[in-house]
Image (cartoon, rainbow, N blue to C red):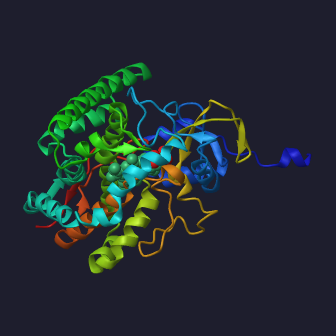
């Protein structure tokens, strides 16, 4: 037998594994297997997905090669999502306008409001000894915080959630049906923001929309389409991601009472716990890109125009970068990519951290012991890790 014949063949990789419900429940095992096949593997919808930490970081840091422009993904909208679907150098003019709005000092000012809101929501169900976590807290908390910030009516939350879910989680049996659903919902979002903006131009209020109506970037007033692109992205990011993170965190903590005790016994652990859970759970599992020039990465060729997935979840568990990546240590100083990297790094990370820390603190003060209702099978959605239902129980 020749040397070539004895070489071990790499394990076969089925891209449908990305969409397997078991992957949703245990993504970390899937990431490990995928990386054992290669730093780049076939993606779930054709194209390739980048799995290695080094390669993921490279792709995120090089938008001139891996662009997040509108061709990377279209959710049915007619305008680019700003600033996500704008490449440098234009991108930076939008971040100059938007960064101060979400700066840590400004966000810290709303901490008491967030804390009060968490407690009001808990008041509503604590005596029942149970709740469906998504509808009781994970959805209403971040959505209310965000709608208030934007100046939109919290009483219309159900409508906003329906529009957002119709875009991020459209029903449909095939791609055509799914895209048709997205277009309908995107049309509604665009109509809603156009009308509200026209209203704010007539009657300015003390809110973000009114601020955008008169804001300038690079010496020019923002156009209606630009404002629409910003608000559209805000609606998707502001109403979904923190919900996903809260669900992942509480599903994890409910199943790991030892880890939970660290938070209950010492609230000073919460900031590092939030970072470690963001790393381990990685609620935004991956992001899409489109290749701008023929290129080689991780030993794999990429062709101009190719659609590519970047697995942030896999990068966050890559043992080549973090040897004990499969130990969850809520006290360690974690470096993760859960908010992305490079120019498109998350604009809302300070707000997200504030909401996550405040919720962990207030909840565990009042409900230190809880479990997932026996017999529940958790189903996490692909991409943005939302759980379909998370029933929690605690002693009263
Ligand atoms: C735990 C919660 C959150 C997570 C895990 C998260 C994650 C991410 C990730 C991974 C990216 C990079 C996307 C890419 O490179 O393609 C991103 C970008 C972004 N996020 Fe977040 N996000 C969270 C909360 C928020 C919130 C609350 C907002 C509200 C404004 C927000 C607004 C944005 C925006 C506007 C961008 C685009 C930034 C740019 O292109 O310059 N995010 N986020």
> Which sits in the foreground, 379 or 244?
244
Residue most extreme to the front? 219
Vertical arrangement, residue 33 with respect to residue 382, above or below: below
Q: Which quadrant of the figure contains the C terminus?
A: bottom left
> Which sits in the foreground, 395 or 204?
204
Tell me: 387 left or right of 324.
left
Number of callouts in the render?
Answer: 0
Vertical arrangement, residue 323 with respect to residue 391, above or below: below
Which residue appears at 71% of the width and 35% of the height? 294
Q: Is residue 375 visible?
A: yes
Q: Is residue 169 visible?
A: no
Vertical arrangement, residue 204 with respect to residue 163, above or below: below
Which residue appears at 48% of the width and 69% of the height? 334
Q: Toward which corner of the image does residue 102 lie, by quadrant?
A: bottom left
Q: Position of residue 125 (x, y in %)?
A: 10, 57
Which residue appears at 24% of the width and 66% of the height? 109
Q: Toward which corner of the image does residue 105 lie, by quadrant?
A: bottom left
> Which sits in the foreground, 237 or 97?
97
Q: Position of residue 248 (x, y in %)?
A: 35, 55
Q: Position of residue 280 (x, y in %)?
A: 45, 60
Q: Position of residue 309 (x, y in %)?
A: 55, 40
């Amino acid at each position: 037998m020749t040397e070539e014949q004895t070489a071990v063949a790499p394990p076969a990789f089925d891209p449908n594994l990305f969409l397997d419900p078991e992957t949703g429940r245990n993504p970390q095992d899937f990431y490990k297997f995928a990386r054992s096949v290669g730093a780049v593997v076939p993606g779930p919808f054709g194209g390739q997905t980048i799995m290695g930490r080094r390669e993921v970081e490279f792709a995120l840091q090089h938008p001139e090669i891996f662009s997040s422009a509108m061709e990377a993904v279209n959710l049915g909208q007619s305008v680019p999502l700003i600033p996500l679907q704008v490449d440098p150098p234009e991108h930076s003019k939008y971040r100059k306008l938007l960064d101060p709005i979400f700066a840590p000092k400004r966000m810290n000012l709303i901490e008491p409001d967030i804390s009060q809101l968490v407690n009001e929501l808990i008041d509503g169900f604590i005596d029942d000894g149970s709740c469906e976590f998504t509808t009781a807290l994970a959805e209403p908390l971040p959505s209310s915080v965000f709608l208030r910030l934007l100046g939109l009516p919290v009483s219309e939350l159900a409508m906003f959630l329906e529009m957002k879910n119709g875009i991020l989680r459209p029903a449909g049996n095939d791609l055509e049906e799914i895209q048709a659903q997205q277009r309908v919902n995107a049309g509604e979002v665009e109509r809603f923001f156009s009308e509200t903006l026209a209203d704010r131009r007539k009657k300015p209020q003390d809110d973000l929309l009114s601020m955008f109506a008169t804001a300038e970037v690079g010496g020019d007033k923002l156009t209606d389409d630009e404002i629409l692109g910003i608000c559209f992205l805000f609606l998707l990011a502001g109403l979904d991601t923190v919900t996903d993170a809260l669900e992942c965190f509480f599903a994890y903590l409910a199943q790991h009472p030892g880890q939970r005790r660290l938070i209950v016994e010492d609230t000073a652990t919460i900031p590092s716990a939030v970072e470690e859970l963001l790393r381990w759970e990685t609620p935004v599992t991956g992001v899409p890109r489109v290749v701008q020039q023929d290129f080689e990465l991780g030993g794999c060729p990429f062709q101009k125009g190719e659609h590519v997935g970047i697995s942030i979840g896999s990068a966050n568990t890559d043992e080549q970068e973090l040897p004990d990546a499969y130990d969850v240590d809520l006290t360690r100083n974690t470096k993760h990519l859960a908010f992305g990297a490079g120019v498109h790094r998350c604009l809302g990370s300070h707000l997200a951290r504030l909401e996550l820390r405040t919720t962990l603190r207030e909840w565990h003060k009042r409900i230190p012991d809880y479990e997932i209702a026996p017999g529940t099978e958790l189903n996490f959605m692909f991409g943005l890790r939302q759980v379909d239902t998370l029933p929690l129980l605690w002693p009263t």
